[in-house]
């Protein structure tokens, strides 16, 4: 086998190391050593997805992903083992990649790698005598998923995007898979697809853990060498080439719960993304530097803007996505011209802009998945001929516009998904776009250095209603602000401050903002003069709460969102910085706080309006605890013990759809646990009885009784609650502790409570928590029909005491 080589650890916390290598069988390896990582994160990606499926059986790659998790006769199934050690697992099939990923306690790294490789190398289902029945069961699960996702805008976006694809290209069809598209699929067809694509040269294995690189490399080699080699890395690939796109310039489409979203897609030559990744990354960041957002916001057209060279379902393309206001949707053509002109100005600066000088730290939890998806997609096009430098200035982009209404009498529908759409022509063809107007820089501050505050622990300085916190040891200056807030204003604030935030991030700064039960807050970190930036952002704070937007997406996802929603209870203004903020900033903060407090108090929470959605009903039983470390730990442990058995009971044994999960969330420190089921073929009463029966029959039996099992569960909780993984996370934890009125971070309080937890204390707390009648609530969302534009949806919520027969476990 070959050796590994170390790379610059871009985007990882200080002190990290990054390396790559390739084994003798052709497996590509990426590994990151992050000493502060709480857990080991693993991902294995296969360079095969929708584009590699045989035309008669759309969804075959997705079906194989499901079937690989089928338990074998001998040993413990991967899903059960991951649940037993307190980890998480998942998988995802996309256009070019299928990836399998795990999150585990760091001590389980080697065994997790071995089990992950065994999952994809030698699937037990394909050689099992019961394979036909198991395959049929998984097809039914995928069909339930497809029926439920007919209310998901993401599915309708892919369907609309397929209308821009040439009729003969494999991206033209529906790739979600359902009962009709998978009719007749046998285990033999799955074996053929597996043998062709699940080979080491077509795979990428990524690991992020606290262990040293050498130790990770040894474990990766021991596991990865069991993958079958042979074949070519390009075997079975369908390159996304110039024949992908049809002549149609754009598509306007409609879906429940989404409107005013404009996507501009500039197709790239095959191999461009692999050979000019730095230039494309710089172009995407250039479009997000705040200048384009400022030009669109000044016209009142824009709510949000993002750019990427990795658009979902669009192959090799540079994508710019605008979320438009109602006025912006009416002027979408002018907005598109401004975007095209801005891109032309960026391309005119240099043929190869190069990589950006500074990148923000990446989220460690999803780092391995991003690595395998990116490198699998790159490997698919590296065999292509050398691509020229990025040349997009004369190219008309393809357009996708999600509309509120489509012209009557012209609407067409995409087969299978029934997505309504109409052709969309580019409004100004022929002449090149005008030069970029060169409007004023959106950042009303000047670059400068921030004086460092005194070292040591933060100390409190009395200063009227505003509390100033100073001190700390961060390498880059921080400024954190908090003030009372009434109503849901965060979305309006994000829209109004978009150009400022993008300009700040383009200069290397980092920014977080949020709103919860304690009010609104803003945290800045960077090398700019932070007080002027904070003042400019505070000027954008809305004086009134905007109306709540209707929900969109899967019913179960909308129910899970409610686990984190709380009623605001404004508190005193708060400011924390490494140096006392300027007097002008304090006065401005007081003015914002006074305006917020003087406004009308928010009404009691009302049921959000529910957009028409796909088939089915989603039901959630919500268990709400108190904000004590002990109850928070108990609910976390319940989620850990119940999640996998709940999925098996609801989906595999009862056949109640494809969404069945137990999720833990916190809302301003208040712990909540949700048991969620979504099914296209069952009513709310059936789902309610199924959840109650699970809790009554299995709830207590699944809790650890002590000994090794309890020790293993507590070790998994300890790994999840350990010290912060990055400097940014540590300072955000400290800031939230100050907002709560204490200098002790939350994770320290939980860690101390965990040390005192034993079996007797745990059971006593659970008995008290689960027996409290006011702790339980039912939430339901139901779609009466799946036909877009004609369906009615209902939402309801009520509290109930759980009966002794079917209630608390």
Image (tube, helix red, strand yellow):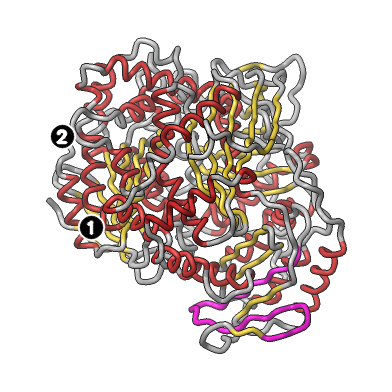
Q: State the residue position of label 2.
A: 230
Determine the residue positioned at 72% across, 70% down: 444
Determine the residue positioned at 68% across, 52% down: 566
Residue 307 visible in this rendered orientation of the protein: yes
- Within the magenta stretch, is there residue 78? no
Residue 373 visible in this rendered orientation of the protein: no
* Mark 1 / mark 2, whichever is N-terminal: 1
Q: Front-most of 524 and 486?
A: 486
Residue 128 rendering spot, x and y as whole percentages: 21, 21
- Within the magenta stretch, is there residue 476? yes
Quarter location, residue 184 = top left
Q: Front-most of 773 and 50?
A: 773
Q: Which stretch is magenta?
A: 461-484
Residue neighbourhood size for the residue with mark 2, other residues' Cα within 10 Å, grouped as few (<14), some (14–19), many (≥20)? few
Quarter location, residue 802 = top right
Compared to 430, does 54 lie above or below? Answer: above
Compared to 458, does 20 lie above or below? Answer: above
Q: Front-most of 341 and 408?
A: 408
């Amino acid at each position: 086998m070959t050796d590994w080589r170390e790379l610059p650890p871009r985007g990882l916390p200080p002190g990290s190391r990054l390396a790559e290598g390739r084994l003798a069988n052709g497996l590509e390896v990426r590994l990151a050593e992050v000493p502060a990582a709480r857990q080991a994160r693993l991902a294995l990606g296969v360079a095969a997805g929708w584009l590699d499926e045989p035309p008669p059986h759309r969804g075959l790659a997705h079906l194989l992903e499901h079937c690989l998790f089928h338990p074998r006769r001998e040993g413990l199934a991967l899903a059960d083992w991951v649940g037993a050690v307190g980890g998480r697992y998942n998988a995802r099939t996309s256009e070019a990649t299928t990836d399998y990923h795990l999150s585990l306690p760091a001590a389980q790294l080697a065994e997790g790698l071995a089990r992950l490789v065994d999952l994809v190398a030698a699937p037990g289902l394909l050689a099992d005598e019961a394979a036909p029945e198991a395959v049929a069961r998984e097809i039914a699960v995928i069909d339930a998923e497809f029926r439920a996702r007919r209310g998901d805008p993401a599915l309708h976006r892919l369907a609309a995007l397929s209308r821009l694809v040439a009729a003969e290209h494999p991206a033209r069809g529906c790739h979600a898979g359902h009962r009709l598209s998978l009719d007749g699929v046998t285990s033999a067809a799955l074996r053929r697809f597996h043998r062709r694509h699940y080979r080491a040269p077509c795979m990428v294995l990524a690991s992020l853990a606290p262990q040293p690189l050498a130790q990770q490399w040894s474990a990766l080699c021991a596991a990865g060498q069991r993958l079958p080699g042979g074949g070519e890395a390009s075997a079975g690939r369908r390159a996304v080439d110039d024949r992908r796109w049809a002549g149609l310039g754009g598509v306007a489409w409609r879906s429940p719960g989404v409107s005013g979203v404009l996507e501009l897609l500039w197709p790239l030559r095959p191999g461009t993304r692999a050979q000019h990744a730095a230039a494309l990354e710089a172009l995407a960041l250039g479009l997000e530097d705040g200048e384009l957002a400022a030009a669109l916001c000044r016209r009142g057209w824009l709510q949000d803007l993002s750019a990427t060279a990795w658009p979902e379902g669009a192959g090799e393309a540079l994508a710019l996505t605008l979320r438009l206001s109602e006025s912006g949707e009416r002027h979408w053509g002018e907005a598109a011209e401004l975007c095209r002109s801005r891109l032309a100005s960026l391309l005119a600066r240099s043929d190869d802009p190069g990589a950006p000088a500074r990148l923000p730290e990446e989220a460690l939890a999803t780092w391995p998945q991003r690595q395998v998806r990116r490198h699998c997609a790159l490997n698919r096009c590296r065999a292509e001929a050398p691509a020229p430098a990025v040349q997009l200035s004369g190219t008309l982009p393809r357009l996708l516009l999600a509309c509120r209404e489509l012209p009557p009498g012209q609407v067409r529908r995409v087969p299978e998904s029934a997505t309504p759409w109409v052709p969309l022509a580019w409004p100004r063809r022929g002449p090149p776009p005008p030069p970029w107007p060169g409007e004023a820089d959106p950042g009303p501050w000047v670059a400068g250095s921030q004086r460092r505050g005194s070292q040591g622990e933060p100390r409190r300085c009395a200063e009227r209603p505003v509390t100033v916190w100073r001190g700390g040891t961060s390498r880059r200056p921080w400024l954190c602000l908090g003030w009372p807030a009434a109503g849901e204003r965060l979305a309006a604030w994000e829209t109004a401050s978009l150009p400022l935030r993008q300009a700040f991030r383009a200069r290397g700064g980092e920014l977080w903002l949020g709103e919860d039960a304690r009010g609104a807050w803003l945290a800045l970190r960077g090398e700019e003069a932070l007080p002027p930036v904070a003042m400019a952002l505070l000027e954008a704070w809305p004086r009134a709460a905007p109306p709540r937007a209707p929900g969109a997406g899967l019913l179960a996802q909308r129910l899970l969102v409610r686990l984190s929603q709380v009623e605001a209870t404004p508190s005193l203004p708060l400011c924390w910085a490494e140096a006392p903020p300027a007097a002008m900033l304090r006065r401005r903060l007081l003015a914002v706080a006074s305006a917020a407090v003087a406004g009308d108090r928010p009404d009691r929470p009302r049921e959000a309006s529910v957009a028409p959605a796909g088939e089915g009903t989603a039901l959630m039983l919500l268990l709400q605890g108190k904000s004590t470390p002990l109850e928070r730990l108990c609910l976390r442990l319940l989620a850990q013990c119940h999640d996998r058995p709940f999925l098996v009971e609801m989906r595999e044994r009862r056949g109640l759809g494809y969404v069945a999960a137990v999720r833990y969330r916190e809302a301003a420190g208040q712990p909540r646990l949700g048991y969620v089921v979504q099914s296209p073929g069952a009513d709310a009463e059936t789902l309610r009885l199924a959840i109650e029966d699970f809790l009554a029959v299995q709830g207590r039996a699944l809790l650890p009784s002590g000994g090794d099992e309890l020790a293993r569960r507590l070790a998994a909780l300890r790994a999840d609650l350990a010290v912060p993984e990055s400097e940014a996370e540590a300072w955000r934890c400290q800031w939230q502790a100050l907002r709560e009125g204490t200098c002790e971070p939350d994770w320290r309080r939980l860690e101390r409570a965990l040390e005192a937890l034993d079996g007797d204390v745990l059971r006593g707390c659970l008995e008290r928590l689960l027996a409290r009648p006011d702790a339980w609530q039912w939430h339901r969302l139901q779609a009466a029909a799946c036909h877009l534009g004609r369906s009615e949806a209902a939402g309801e919520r009520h509290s109930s005491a759980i009966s002794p027969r079917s209630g608390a476990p």
